Every structure is written in structure tokens, then in C-alpha cells.
Amino acid sequence: MTATIVDLSIPLAPNLPCWWPGLEPFSASPTFRLETENVLSRNLRIEEHSGTHMDAPCHIGDNQRQPISLLTADAVPLATLMGRARVVDARDVRSTENGVSPWIEPALIERYERAAGAIAAGDAVLFWTGWTDRHYLPLDAGGRDFVERPLAAEAPGWPAPRAACLEYLAGKGVRLVGVDTPTLGAIQDTFSPHQAAFRASITPVENLCNLKSLEDKTATFLFLPLRILASSGAPGRAIALVEER
């Protein structure tokens, strides 16, 4: 049996919405040039939660602003960042209200399980909303609809799983959840989905794309983060190894 590698990572560039509005934008500036030093290299300025990235358990605290966990991204075991890809189709979960995220409910996961089989311990559950595929565009070509305009209540928000979804998956033994949206959280409630995930030792991987490529496929999901010491999160490369029969 052989496998095909499918890239599930969004590209990073200064003209793409790969950073959170209000934070320092992603930039890449030359440090060496071929025409002067015969070397090409660039200096990157990048926030820990840019592009396709993981959130560490230390990223968000509880409602009293106390840590849920002190575990940093570099200390998250790599074995928990991979698993059988279980792609839950949430494309019909859409908002018509500006600045509001529609909730993905546990019933959607249960419906998926009835059709595709029970989710098991160690599976990587990926919520396929189609958000990145529709909205991750150059900023001057509609890319502000990805995160900036929804945050400003100028466009509808991306779908987000309720905390109850994370609690349900935790009961199944899931330790990795991926979303093809800017964040696991909702615009109107960014904290509760993250808090539920971190209390259950679930690692969120955000800003995935191309989940359609895994539809009706048998695949293993894998995320490899940059090893940044004491980090609250880390960008990386998300791929799937799709079995070819």
C-alpha cells in the first residue's frame, strides 16, 4: 500500500490574511541579496499563531485568568499531533449575521459517526467548513472577509465548535482537533471552546485548508510545529497521508 501526501497548510505572505488583526503583520525582508552578497536570505517577523498553527495548552486561561495548563507548544508530545483523519462535514453551518459565528453542535458529530463509523481514541477530528477555501485570498481581492471584516461585524463569522463538541470528543479519547477557520473559538465567544479543549488535553490546529481532498478517503493527519521553546503556539506544516489502494 502506498500513500499520497496532501498539503493542508495555508501559505504565508504579507498580502495574505495570515495574522490576527491588531497584531504585528507577517513580514519577510531581505537580509542578504544575491546581487550584493551572492546569498539570498530573508528575516521573518511572525507571531506564534500565524498561518496554519497549533495552540498550546498554556495559550488561554480560565475565567479567573488563571492557567488551565502550563504546557507550552514545544512540550506537547508529537505523538498527539497525528492520527486517523476524521473529516466532519460542517459546510452547511453558516451565519447570516455580521460579526457572529454559527455554532457547530455535537449532533453534527453524532450524525457523522452514524454515517462513517464511531470516532475512536487517537483519531484526529477535522471540521471541514470550507472557510479557508472560500475566504483565504489576497487582502486586496476579498481576503479581508477571512477574519478582519467578521471581527469588525462587517461580515458573517466563521463556524466554531461549541465547548460541548470538545467535551464529547474528549470522552472518545480524541487529543487533536483541526479547523479550517482562523481559530477554534467563535467571534462572540473565543474562550469556551479553547478552555474545553485544554482541560481535556486536546490540541487545536487552526487555519487548515483543502480538507475536501480527504473526503471519503482513508488518511493519517500529521502536524509538525516549529520547535520554539516556551511558546504559546507554533506555526507548522499540516499534511495528510492518503492511502492509495
Image (cartoon, helix red, strand yellow):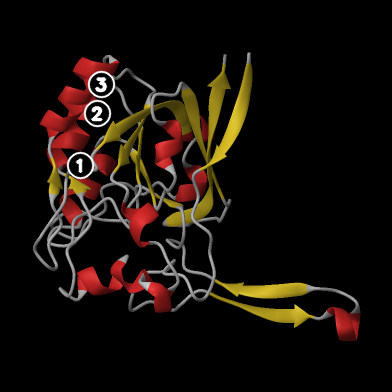
The crowding category of the residue bearing disc 3, from other C-alpha atoms within 10 Å (few below 14, some 14 to 19, many at least 20), is some
What residue is rendered at 11% in x and 29% in y?
Answer: 107
Mark 2–mark 3 CB contact (< 8 Å): yes
Looking at the rendered structure, the kind of residue marked 3 is: Lys
Residue named by callout 1: 196
Is disc 1 in contact with disc 2, using a CB cutoff of under 8 Å? yes
Q: In this view, does 152 lie above or below 120?
A: below
Residue found 47% across the figure and 68% down from its top? 47
The residue wearing badge 3 is 172
Q: Earlier in the sequence, mark 1 or mark 3?
A: 3
- Left or right, 36 with reference to 181: right
Q: Residue at x 33, y 79 (%)?
A: 22
Identified by mark 2, the residue type is: Ala
* Nearer to the camera, 224 or 212: 212
Q: Which residue is labeled 2 in the image?
A: 170
Task: Locate residue 231 relative to residue 224 in the image: left or right.
Answer: left
User: Quadrant where the C terminus lies?
Assistant: top right
Closer to viewer: mark 1 or mark 3:
3
- Separation (CA) of disc 1 from disc 2: 9 Å
